């Protein structure tokens, strides 16, 4: 909504904090502007909202809704940080770790990974009750500049939306259903597509994990200078309230 003239706003609350919103804004968009962080993984600025990861689930009007897709409403009372919601988010993130192969100590995305950072934010420090599925997924290194390690993919769909809506290419898409759903490319392999390292879908900010790998740039950011080395995920939003 930036750059356009806004109509008079309205207010609602998140955990008792009064938030100003404007027509057409989602709960998450209004919260971000007000400096209230709502956890999310599939949502990303500049991409259309999808509401698939459910990490952004909040209670609004007594119902569980996805904050990234649910419109803000006047007088709405939203719950964001409650023990029940925190546990639900932790369970969701734990399952994402268990459904893939996430070896954080040897991953070049460590320190810049939103999934890893979300685990820290949700204080995932104890053993979980879910079994590790340990899937066997192929590594596609066919492209001269890009590699895909789908062992790390969390099916957030951000690369799909970025490729379709920003790059206008539609390189990525979902195949399969349920737990077998995965992200695939529109060719025999990535080299068989028109993917370029300059595509927005390939940029470091789009993939929240280490699935999309730009060759020859791994481990270039030293420990101590990585995105989440100096603050929890969401701290940039929360700093707006200080």
Image: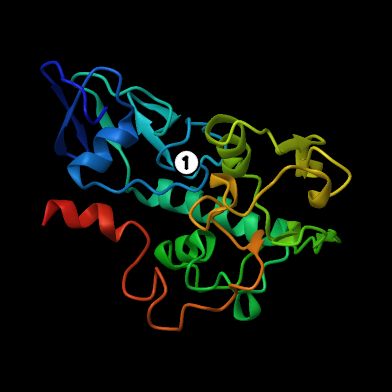
Q: Is residue 221 visible?
A: yes
Residue 130 visible in the picture:
no
Q: Which residue appears at 58% of the width and 35% of the height?
A: 161
The image shows residue 3 at horizontal and vertical percentages of 21, 28
| Callout count | 1
Report which quarter residue 71 is drawn in.
top left
Task: Identify the residue at image location x=75%, y=64%.
Answer: 132
Q: Which residue is mark 1?
A: 43
Question: Which quadrant: the N terminus?
Answer: top left
Residue drawn where x is 22% and y is 40% of the image:
33
Q: Is residue 1 above or below residue 88?
A: above
From this view, report whether residue 228 is shown above or below residue 24: below
* Figure colour scheme: rainbow
Circle 1 crowding by C-alpha within 10 Å: few under 14, some 14–19, many from 20: many
Using the rendered view, name the quadrant where residue 8 is placed.
top left
Q: Compare residues 84 and 114 and report the one nearer the observer.
A: 114
Tag 1's secondary structure? loop
Please say if 139 is above or below 59. below
Residue extending furthest bottom? 223
Quadrant into which the C terminus falls = bottom left
Residue 143 point in image, percent of width and height: 77, 58
**Position of 31 compared to 38: left or right?**
left
Q: Position of residue 241 (x, y in %)?
A: 13, 52
**Residue found 25% across the figure and 33% down from its top:** 30
Between 147 and 174, the one lying in front of the other is: 147
Horizontal and vertical percent for residue 155? 66, 45
């Amino acid at each position: 909504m930036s750059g356009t003239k806004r109509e008079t706003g309205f207010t609602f609350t998140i955990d008792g904090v009064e938030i100003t919103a404007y027509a057409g804004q989602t709960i998450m968009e209004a919260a971000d502007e007000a400096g209230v962080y709502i956890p999310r993984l599939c949502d990303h600025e500049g991409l259309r909202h999808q509401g698939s990861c459910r990490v952004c689930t909040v209670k609004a009007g007594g119902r569980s809704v996805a904050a990234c897709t649910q419109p803000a409403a006047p007088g709405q009372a939203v719950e964001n940080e409650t023990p029940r919601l925190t546990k639900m988010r932790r369970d969701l993130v734990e399952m994402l770790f268990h459904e893939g192969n996430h070896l954080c100590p040897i991953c070049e995305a460590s320190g810049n990974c939103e999934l890893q950072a979300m685990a820290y934010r949700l204080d995932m420090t104890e053993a979980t009750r879910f079994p590790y599925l340990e899937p066997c997924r192929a590594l596609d290194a066919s492209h001269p500049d890009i590699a895909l390690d789908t062992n790390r993919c969390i099916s957030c769909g951000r690369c799909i939306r970025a490729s379709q809506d920003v790059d206008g290419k539609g390189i990525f898409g979902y195949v399969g259903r349920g737990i077998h759903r995965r992200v695939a490319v529109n060719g025999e392999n990535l080299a068989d597509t028109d993917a370029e390292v300059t595509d927005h879908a390939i940029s470091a900010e789009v993939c929240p994990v280490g699935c999309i790998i730009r060759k020859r740039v791994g481990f270039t950011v030293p420990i101590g200078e990585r995105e989440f080395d100096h603050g929890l995920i969401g701290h940039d939003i929360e700093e707006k309230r200080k």
